[in-house]
Amino acid sequence: MDVVTGRRKTRRIDLGGVPIGGGAPVIVQSMTSSDTRDVVATVEQVLALEEAGCEIIRVAVPDEPAAAAIREIKERIHIPLIADIHFNHRLALLALHAGADAIRINPGNISQEGIRGIAALAKEKRKVIRIGINAGSLEQDILARHGGPTAEALVESALKNLILLEEMGCHALKLSLKSSSVSTTIAAYRAISEKTDYPLHLGVTEAGTLLQAAIKSAIGIGALLYDGIGDTIRVSVTGDPLEEIGVAFGILRALDIRRVGPEIISCPTCGRCEIGLAALVERVEGELKGMKTPLKIALMGCVVNGPGEAAEADIGIAGGRGVGLLFKKGEIVRKIKEEDFVPVLLQEIRKLASADRE
């Protein structure tokens, strides 16, 4: 355990110029939902994810045209790219030749001979391999031995394949042990973190649509990060991958691990609320999407808790009947009308963001 940061010490690897492990910041990843063979659509999605704060991207490689498309995609994006490989190890070789910065393999559906071929080329090109253990595709002998995809089964598979790759001379490795069960995921990562110092990629797989994914990921990823476990994270959301980024950074902010983008504090509302708080919060959140400056913004619906909460924020509004008090760094700036809340607040936020960049 790192006594300064509270994070477990892991070895440092370099993934396409992004440091992972060894005290580096926890990195946010995502995966495209586009057809990788459609270069234009994939690049467009990656660029949008970059703008939202995504730091590493993974793309599916189901066939040779998808592997070949990596070369052109890489030329037009700005973050490292991981090729996601299942079943056919030759696709991993093609992806590496096309410029992929890392390969994610699921050992449960690739032969040992295939893994050896991937390992040899990854070592030659000095690329990272992620051993992606998934509860839905464990090796049959391990499943039989443990009676199902238990945490112990995930750990056994991870260690078995880690040893195999180490014997092949590969050490630029990171691990993931994912399950759709939050409790199994937490138990597996806690166990593996005691047995190896390789960087760990955290995630709860098949987490569902936004609300369910946010709940499962906040509990699963959040609990592990709180334990000091984890070097990269992905929040898996069924639907638009852009939704993953906000949840991921929200988890990191909530644990004071990284501050990226604005954090909005707003009360749940009650009978004392005399302003349209829900609409206000929704409008402000929408206007600030993609903003990287770490600001704490308080939007409060009454004068009971409002002034105190707003005083703890970089900027905020405590509302009353049709009016509100604008606070900045704990000081009252002025009284403003409710219809002016959004334009005035956004103007002041942008001033703070501009000052932060200078």
Image (cartoon, helix red, strand yellow):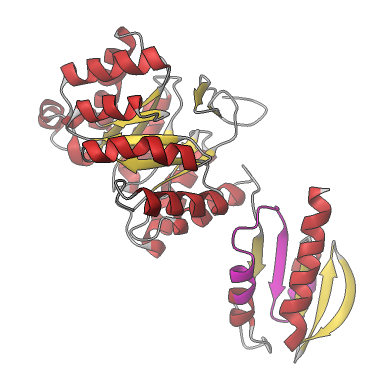
* Residue 297 is a magenta residue: yes
**Closer to the camera in the image, 56 or 323:** 56
Q: Give the residue at x 16% y 16%.
A: 113
Image quarter of residue 237 = bottom left
Q: Give the residue at x 30% y 9%.
A: 168
* Residue 320 is a magenta residue: no
Compared with 210, 158 (above or below) is above
**Closer to the camera in the image, 287 or 246:** 287
**Closer to the camera in the image, 144 or 22:** 22
Looking at the figure, which quarter contains the N terminus? top right
Left or right of 347: which side holds 31? left
- The number of discs equals 0
- The stretch of residues the image draws in magenta is 283-308
Compared with 138, 264 (above or below) is below
Q: Give the residue at x 80% y 51%.
A: 356
Q: Position of residue 239 (x, y in %)?
A: 35, 61
